[in-house]
Every structure is written in structure tokens, then in C-alpha cells.
Image (spheres, coloured by chain):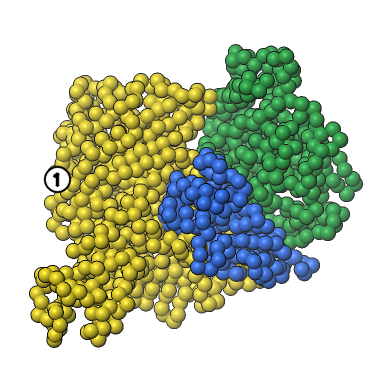
Chain colours: A green, B blue, C yellow
Amino acid sequence: MALFRYHRPGDLSEAHARAVTPGAMYIAGGTDLLQLVQERVTQPAEVIDVNRLAPPEIETSEGGVRIGAGAKLNAMAAHPLVRERYPVVAEALMGSASPQVRNMATAGGNLLQRTRCLYFRDVATPCNKRQPGSGCSAWDGQNRQNAIFGGSPTCIAVQPSDFAVALLACDAEIVLASPGGERRVPMADFHRLPIEAPEIETVMEPGELITAIELPDRAAQRRSRYLKVRDRASFEWAVTSCALSIRMEGGAVSEARVAVGGVGTKPWRLPNVEPAIVGQALTEQVITSAAERAAEGAEPRQHNAFKVPLLVGTVRKALREFAQMEAVQP
Amino acid sequence: MPEDGRALEIELRVNGQSRRLGVEGSTTLLDALRDRLHLTGTKKGCDLGQCGACTVLLDGQRVVSCLTLAAQADGRDVITIEGIAPEGQLHPVQAAFIEHDAFQCGYCTPGQIMSAVALIQEGRATSDEEIREHMSGNLCRCGAYTNIVAAVRDAAAKMA
Amino acid sequence: MSSNAVIGSPVSRVDGPDKVHGRATYAAEFKPEGLAYAALVLSRIPSGRIKSIDVSLAMTVPGVVSVITHENAPRLPYKEMKKRPQVDPKAGGQLRVFQDDKVLWSGQPIACVVADSIEQAETAADLIRVTYSPDAQAQTKFDRALGLKPAPEAEADGRPGETQRGDAASAFDSSPVKVEGWYLQPREQHNPIELHATIAKWDGDHLTLWDKTQWVDNDRAEIAHVFDIPQDKIRVISPFVGGAFGSALRTWHHVHIAAMAAKMTGRAVRLELTRREQFTNTGSRPHTEQHVALGALEDGRLAALIQEAWGQTSTYEEYAETTLDPPRQTYSVANNATRYRLVHMNVNTPTSMRAPGVATGVFAQEIAMDELAVALGMDPVELRLKNYAETDEYKSKPWSSKELRACYAKAADDFGWSRRSPEPRSMQDNGQLVGWGMATAIYPSHRSPAQATVRLHRDGHVLLRTAASDMGPGTYTSMTQVAADTLDLPVEKVRFELGDTDFAMAPVHGGSITMASVGTAVMAACQALQKKVGELAAASSGGPFKGAASDTLLFQGGGLALKNGGGFTPYGEFLAQHGLEWLDAEGKSEPGAESETHTSSAFGAVFAEVRVDPDLGTVRVPRLVGAYDVGRVINPKIAHSQCIGGMVGGIGMALLEMVEWDDRYGRVMNANLAEYLVPVCADIVQLEASFVPSDDKIFNPLGVKGLAEIAISGVAPAIANAVFHATGKRVRDLPILPERLLL
């Protein structure tokens, strides 16, 4: 791997100070960053290892469960607080990457992983996200895996995190630490649309670090599940995915979050599907007609047009399986 | 370690032995094992965490050594294929791989075996379906998968 | 002859312990003194010239030993070989790396950095600044209209541009039942898990190469011509190959670079390609488009079979495939026409990938046959039996053996084919669409001259050596068995070594020819050893064998005896009696008249079950069943592994594998293993492979036909046919991704 300096700061303030020097980047699990370095997409002068600073604890907190940014994907997926209260999160995590990568990748890093867009990862082609102003090659190129929501001719790269999609369905908040103190950002607002500056993917400020993710109790009151669709049976990013977090009362849906992955430039909620099931019993007819609305507003390109019917099918299947699950354990 | 972070001196506990070595800040654990320590049983197949051939146990957990910096493993415990069985003996997973012909070219094999050893420790060998899912981080281009699953199932039963 | 019957027994791999301990040493893992590390810079345009290349920053990186570009590389002789080796295209000329400023494809090496560490080399490579004069005429689009007839050299090599038997066009026109379609095989990459690597080291004028290669002897010959040095000044060592599937048949230009870099720096140099580099520097299965037209009578007999193929090649070489051999030979049909065309593009020359050409041709042919079965309302197996080729009608020769009927029967029975309901979408289970499909598999059997040496040691063990390879099929093990069987020794008493040009000559380890070629040479070497022992025995001045005629001797139980009983002497003791530490013999084998009088081929029948999710369009394969006629099976355990391995490759071909090509840039866009998908463990559930009784002693004395390629042949169409049965939707483009079923 091309040369860079390695630095392990003693505390957060040292980390913040180092991070604003030119060419410095944080490294946690490293499972995406080091790929980007190997592919020459990113060329850090120095990496700042925050593994020993990022807390790995998963514990109850006021109003919910707090996951330390340093928690590994496998550890989160296996943790009773996550499995029992937020199964959608555990399922999304277990469907991510490979067992080895899940032992390395962290909660915080997972939300910051970069797109798998083929052009972003090939430095010989134009890409606005990698090289601002150079153009978007995916718009008229090999865009099978690209987004049908939230894109523009500037960029149609998918944000690939399964975890983030599940967190969106759970109304999670991201806790950020900056030299000035701590702040919280709802998951829905954490990633930015790539309209103006696709190279800037989140609302994080330079030097800021994710320290925790908070999952609210109200999401734990809902039942949830994650369905991931892939070309091969495992070890692949989502072609499409659907995170459901639904509260049932008296046989009908009283509250619903339907978030989808693989289709948006950021984790995407389906505003037309949610109201179509709220107040309804999950009958086949309700499911089918709600799912039909999943791709409303989609703007497919040449090679990803199949994601329109696939997303409809994904949401339909997820809702159907959810309804069956409810029928078994009312 | 020197302030500039380059040309680091680190210490790895590799297969129970303390090994001091000099690496660059960007040296991967994989390259440190193969090129610095000449432990070539750990294989390089993609250098991007996408094939699993470089799987080792880091503090007892399976990881891909190509996406681990050697500096990040400083002071930690690394087990490689060379260290899972005493000299002259076969680990039950190794024996099962031979018995079930769970490889052809042998290149992905050390990574498969390290992953299988971890999988059994993780308690993930309760069914063929579970083994298949939790061995999916290790590509085998020769296509020995069904034999790999049989070997893992067999070894897990023998180790139970 | 032998009594211990090692041939046919499921011996565990003799190299198994080395492989499971991580002790088997692959090309990149040798560590000669003073090893330096190389990193490449690849071109970023598909065609044109390098306008400038600035290496000044790169040279400032500490540890950099040398930066090589076309501006400072030595002019290499690149002498023409008298005859292009069988692994190279027959027309055009190979890339002469760093010899000029031309760029022939995007991803071509244009510079190489050598440094003390790989980190330094890669850092310096990133600092090389290149400008180009792009060629506006770059050919980056696959366009059938540009298809050209293969050159005469390719035609002479058995890749004719056109063949004609009867009058296929009129027969098709007048057929009562017809099907016709277009089929797409995308470009695929071999992607062995071991990266291609070469270590080169010069000692004066002698070059040693530790290389990933399927043919050490040809590696040596190629490099001898590139550098114009005698072959005996080069040694190539390659004891283990971590998969190749054809990618290591040729001596690619990175091997030239490694040797050049070692020469320029005076250091041993390792050049290990990255996964991305491998996509554009070690060939690929070429993008191929085919047209098939089948005409039949109402009873199912084929009246016309027309198949045409357009295959991709580079601008500088003609890589032509035997794509159209299957439609010429598989079925009995009086009217047959085939046409092959090459589309030249700015790509690295394609190359053989498992069942090269044949897998592609069989894919289109066998889907078309399924379409015909549907059109006729006939069972797909019955249709194939109806058109069974009793002889090779293409070459007008008898088959040296053919047990394909038994393959159909065995595989159909194992699969439970009789329980299939023929209507599409008629078999559903738990909300999933279930489909059953089948296809014929075929792959020609060839053999080439080969040699082996054997040394009998006083402790009773024998050492066999030949310059063959083992990229995974188990050469070490099967050859050990042949020797043990011939000499009637336990396998523990046989040691087999390969992968070194110092050993006896061996042919390419590809095309499934190793067992028939090298195996027979090993057998001949062991027989020669027995003959020598016998002659020595007869010449004894005393003892039981004195003056014994050769036909009175028995070689059994690890020693020599008289047929009428008595005199048993273990080999070790025999050598001691004759004052010998060891005894050497050698054997060779080569094809005989049978290659003129007969056509030899392996056959098989593959049956597939698929599950298609109607909501998602995803296809999974819960089981595949194959039965194969591969001649005699030396080791059923490792032969079975080869078959299931081919099936996994076939599942990849059917459902996952394709290069995503951007014709605006002329680039491979998914050059990694996260986006170029190959099957993972979770994709593979139940694979059954069996062998029907077969023993082809016409083809060669061992009775083997070859196994490897046959195992991928037919898998993709069997799956595609099952997908049709599940969904009623005919997919003719690979891979069968959800979009092909959803849109």
C-alpha cells in the first residue's frame, strides 16, 4: 500500500488537532478506507487511528440504547439489546459484508463508507464525487447499481450502508464530537443529497468524529425486520433492501417506517408507502397496493430501470413476510 | 514509536511468539506477515477484503489481514495457518479438509481453514445453511464449496 | 501387471498436508536474496500514444531502485518463434512491452517502478505523470458489423471461418418446426484467487523465473525468444499454481517486465499483479454474440442446424475460439452451417478460459435445443436422444468411445427427471417458482507428446519428475497413483515432482490433456524401469533370475519375482545386490494413429433445479446433477471435486459473471471481486456428479479422456433452461440477472 504516516492519538483532543492537518484522515476499522487507498481513490498523508478512542460499548441510555461508535458490526448484531429491541438493525448488520469484515468494521465507520459506484472507484474516469467538477460518468454509463432516488446528472451514487437504512427506520440519532463539544443529528439528516457538492456526503464538519449512535425507545416498541436483495446469496452490497419498523395495534398498523437501500443516494424513506399501510390491517391487498407505490418518484437510468419493479417486489415481499411473522407471534 | 509515524517498530505476538519488526505506517498486516516475517501461509488474493484468502485470527477473531494495518496489530495476538496445530500435527479442521477434499489449487485454503476454525469457535456450525452463510467471506474459485461445508461440519462434530 | 489397483481408488491428495499447513509455495512466495518489489502504471486511454511520461517525482521516493518506461527500457529482440505455441493466437503479434509509445488498450502497463519495498514502489508509481495523444478511432464498441473472417493461420489451427454440410439454409427454410435466436456470452475473467506473479533473478547470463504458469517449458521458450538467449540459460520453477483456468497458459507481458526489471536493476524482482491489473493483463473469455437457427421435422429429427458466432479479440492479435465445434459435432444433422467472425477491439487479447469456446458454443446450442423441445412439445432428453450422433459427422470419423446415452440415463435418474411436469410455471414451492432444465455437455479430448523420468532408490521408493503443472486438478496425486499402480507400490513409496524446466518435457497444463498426455508418459517411464530391472536381473551372474526371459518375470509387491513362484526380491535389495544406489529410466508418450482415425471427446449430461423468486427475479440453484463419460477415472475423489468445481464455475457463468464495460472509455469498470461477482459458499447447495463406466483404450493406454473443461460445459444452459421452465421467460443473455426476468 502506498506510503502514509500512522498516528495513534492519546485522546480525543489530540485526535481533533491532528485531523485538521492537511492530508490527515481518521481510520477505525479501515475496511473501506484502505480499499480506497489501494484503489488510489484516497491518498492520505497520515491516518489517525481512533480505534482505541471510539467506545465499543452498547448499553441502555436515557430513552433508548446507545451504541458506541467503535462497536464492531458483529458485536452489535450479536448484542441482546440490539437483537431484541431492534431486530431490523441486527438483521441489516448480519447481511453486511463478510464475517471477517464484520469483526473489523465499526458502527461509526459503516455510516461513512463511500459509494460502490464503479466510476468513483476507478480513478481513470470522471466522477464528481471523487474529483469535483469532472462530471458524472454513471449518468450515461454502467449504472446498474446506481440510485433511482435522490440523484441528479451531477451524481447518482448509492450510499451503500445497510446499517444506515435500518437506523433510518428506527429514528436513530448520530452523536458527533467536535472540538466545540457534542451534537446530535437525526439519521435522516446525516447524509446529504449529492445535488450541489457530491464529494461532501454528510453534515459532519472537518475534524468531527462520530462517538455514538442512539436508538430511541419508541422504535423498540415497534416490530421490525430487514430484507436484503442481492445477485448472489451473500457477501454483496444490496441491489435493493427494505427496513420495516411497524407498530401494530388491534390488528392494524398504527405507526410505520419503511426505509429502503440500494436505491437512494442516501438511505431513503418511502413517504407514499407508509401512509398506505397506516390504519390498515396487513392484508394481501393492502400490501400489494402499498408496495405498488414504493417506486413513485423514481428516476431510473438505462441500466437500473429494473430497480423500479424490483423495489416494488422487495417492499411487497418484506411486508408480506412481516405480516406472516405477525400472524405467527401476535 | 517514532513521532513521524513512518518506519515504525512494532511488536506482534504471532502464533504465540513475540516478533519485533519494522514496518511502514501503511504496511498491511498481510504484507508484514508475508514479506517481513516470511509467513507465506496467509495468502494475498485481492488486497481489498473481497476474497478472504488473507484471513487470520486477531485477538482470537477472524479478520482480513489485507485491510488491517500492521501498526493496528501492534501488541496484539495474531494466529496464522502456521500456528493452529502443533508441529507435525493436523488441526481437526485441517484433517477434515484433506479427508473431504475441500480444496483443489490450495490457495484459498489457509484462509478457508482460519475462517472455519473461527466459525466453529463462534458456534456457527449448527447447520449446513449456517456454515454456508458464515463461510461466504472466503471465495474458492476452484469451487470446492460443498466439500468445504462437509469438512467444517465434520470437524465441528469432532471438536464438540 | 499391478495387483494393488491404486488407479480408481479415492486417494487423498498427496499435497494436501502442504496445502492445509500453508507450506505449499506459490510463485510470489519465494524469497531470493536481495528481493526488490515492482509496481506498474497502467494506461488510462484505450488507444493512442504516450505524449509524455514524467518520472522525476517518482525517482525521489526513498528506496526506489529504478523506473522503467518505453523511454529507457532496453530494446528487446522479441525474436519470432518458428511456430507460435498452441497457447498463443496464431495471427498477429504479442505486445512488445515498453518498446514504444503506443497504447493498445486501457489498462496496459506503461511503466514499472522497482523499489526496496512494495509500499515504496506503489507510492512512486502514483507519482508518475503521463499525458497522452488519444486516437479518435479507438475501437471500444463491440459491433458485429465489423466482424472479420479469421486469418488463414487460425483456420489452419482448426478454427475455420465457415463450415458447410448439406444445405442448411434451404433445409431450415423448409423445416416444419423452427426456432431461432440471438445469444450473448459477456466477457468473463478467470479470477483465480492467487494473483499472477513472477519473480525474476539473473545470475550472470542465467535467468531463473519463479512464475505462475500452466506451462513452464513454454514460459522458458517464450522468454528465450523475447530476450534472444538460449533456452538452457533459463530455468522456470512453478511447483504450485493457485488456480488459473487458462489465465496462466500464455506467457503474458508482465513476465517480460519482471525479467527486464531484474536485468536492469541487477536485483531479484517480484512483480505481483493487483486484482485490478489482472483484469486487463491476463486475458479473458471473450464477449461473444451468437445466432442459432434450428429446423426439425415433426418427429424431432434435426433437419438443419445453423450457428454463427462473433467473438471479441484485440487489435494486435487474433484470438479465435472453437466456439462452433459443438454445433458441428454434438448432434446428427445432415444440414449444418457454421460461421465464425472476429471483432477487433482495443482490449488485451482474450484467452482460453475453462472450456474455451466450447462452453460458449454449448451455451447457445443447448438453449436453442431446449427451445426446439418446447416448440415440438417433446421432452428435452428425448429430443437429444433422437438426434444422437453415432459418429463425428463433422470429421466423418468414429468416436474412440462415447457413453453419452448412459450419461443421460444416469443423470436423469439421479435427478428424478421423470417427475418433471413439462409446463412452465407448473412446479411451485413455498411461493417460489421451481424449474428443472437440462443440457448436454461435450469437450474434445486431446493429447500431446510428454516425457517423464523415474528413479528407483535403494530404500524402495521411486521419484518421478516431469515439467507438468498442477493448478488444482490433482496432477501430483493422480500421477502418483499411475506410478504406484504400474509399479505395484504403495502410494507412500512414490514421490512425484513437477513444475520445473529442469525436469523432462511436458505439454501445456490446459485443455484437459494432462492425464492422457503426462499420465501415459509416467506409465511408460515406470514400464521402462521394469524393463531395465528385468534386463539387469537376467544379466545376473547367479541367483534365481539369471538368464530369465522377460515374460517369466513378475513385478509385484514392490519387488521382482518369477512368475512360476519364488525369487521375490524387494527393489531395494535388488539394487543392493547389483551394487546400485539407484536406477534411472525414462518414458515418453505421444498420440498415435488414433488421432487420425478417431475423434475423442468427453461427454456429459447436466440437470439443474432453480428457484426463482417471483417478487425479486433472483435465481438460486438448490441442486445440480451431472453424469459424465470421461474415460477411466484415476481418482474418483478428486475427479468428483473437479466436476463440482466446474459446476460452481457454471453457476457463476449462468447467474453472476460479467465484465461491466464502458465503451466510452474502453474500460473494464468492475475490476475487483466485490463487483465482478463469482459464487460464494452460500450460493452452492447440492452438487452431484457421477461417472458412467468408460475406458477409452483407443485414445490412449490409460483409457482416460480428460476432465476439467467438460465439467463447466453445459451447466449454464441447463440453468437457463430451468429458468425458462420456472418462469416461462426465455433468457438468452448471460448472466441471468434479476433484470432479465423483471423487465
Residue at numbered disc 1:
C398
- Relative to residue C447, is residue C233 drawn left or right? right
* Chain at tag 1: C
Q: Is there any visible trace of residue C152 in the rendered image? A: no
Q: Residue furthest right?
A: A180
Residue A268 appears at what percent x and percent y? 69, 30
Q: Is there any visible trace of residue C424 in the rendered image? A: yes
Q: Quadrant of the N terminus of chain C?
A: bottom left
Q: Going 21% across and 54% down the picture, which residue do you hit?
A: C703
Residue B133 position (above or below residue C496):
above
- Residues packed near mark 1 inside 10 Å, few (<14), some (14 to 19) or many (20 plus): some
Which residue is nearer to you in this view: A261 or B40? B40
Quadrant of the rendered image containing residue C391: top left
- Relative to residue C708, is residue A190 drawn left or right? right
Residue C245 appears at what percent x and percent y? 39, 53
Residue A85 appears at what percent x and percent y? 74, 32
Q: How many marks?
A: 1
- Relative to residue B94, is residue C596 drawn left or right? left
Quadrant of the rendered image containing residue B9: bottom right
Q: Going 10% across and 77% down the picture, which residue do you hit?
A: C548
The secondary element bearing badge 1 is classed as strand
Q: Residue furthest front?
A: C566
Residue C655 position (above or below residue C16):
above
Residue C164 appears at what percent x and percent y? 19, 38
Q: Going 41% across and 36% down the picture, which residue do you hit?
A: C623
Q: Going 65% across and 69% down the picture, which residue do you hit?
A: B17
Q: Amino acid under label 1?
A: Pro
Residue C604 position (above or below residue C283):
above
